[in-house]
Amino acid sequence: MATRQHKSTTRESIRECNEAVSRRFHVTLAVYKTIKATTQLIGVVGGILAMQQGADPMTSLTIIGAILVGPEILEYTIANEPPRDHDRKD
C-alpha cells in the first residue's frame, strides 16, 4: 500500500512541484505562477471596469470568482495527483 510521504525540506517540495508542473503543462513553476498571477490581476481589473461601465455586478463577480478559483483548482489537482508507477520511490 502506497502512503504519502512528507517532504523533508522546502527545497525538495518546490523541486517536486516544479517537476509536476513541468510534466503536466510543459512550463516551469515560476512561469506557471507568473501566468496565474497575471491572469488573476487582469480578471479582477476587467471585472471592476465592466461594473463601472454598467455590467451586472453579480455576473461580473461570478466571472471574477471563476478566474480567481480556476488556477487554484489546477494546483489542487497537481498536488493531489497520485504518483505514477515510474515516479514511485520504493
Image (cartoon, rainbow, N blue to C red):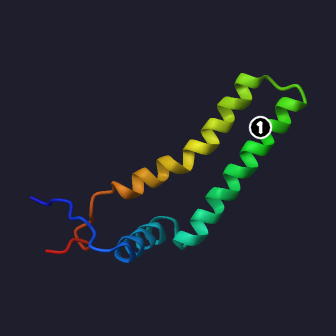
State the residue position of label 1.
Answer: 47
Quarter of the image that includes the C terminus = bottom left
Q: Nearer the viewer, residue 19 or 4?
A: 4
Quarter of the image that includes the N terminus = bottom left
The x and y percentages for residue 66 are 61, 38
Mark 1: few/some/many CA within 10 Å (<14, 14-19, 20+): many
Amino acid type assigned to the residue bearing label 1 in the image:
Gly
Farthest residue to the right: give it: 53
The total number of labels drawn is 1
Element at badge 1? helix
The x and y percentages for residue 64 are 68, 37
Q: Is residue 76 left or right of residue 5?
A: right
Residue 27, above or below 45: below
The x and y percentages for residue 29 are 52, 70
Q: Is residue 63 left or right of residue 55?
A: left
Residue 39, above or below 35: above
Residue 63's image quarter? top right
The x and y percentages for residue 67 are 64, 43
Give the residue at x 80% y 42%: 46
Residue 68's image quarter? top right
Give the residue at x 58% y 63%: 33
Give the residue at x 27% y 65%: 84
Residue 22, above or below 41: below
Farthest residue to the front: give it: 9
Residue 83's image quarter? bottom left
Give the residue at x 15% y 59%: 3
Q: Is residue 70 left or right of residue 85?
A: right
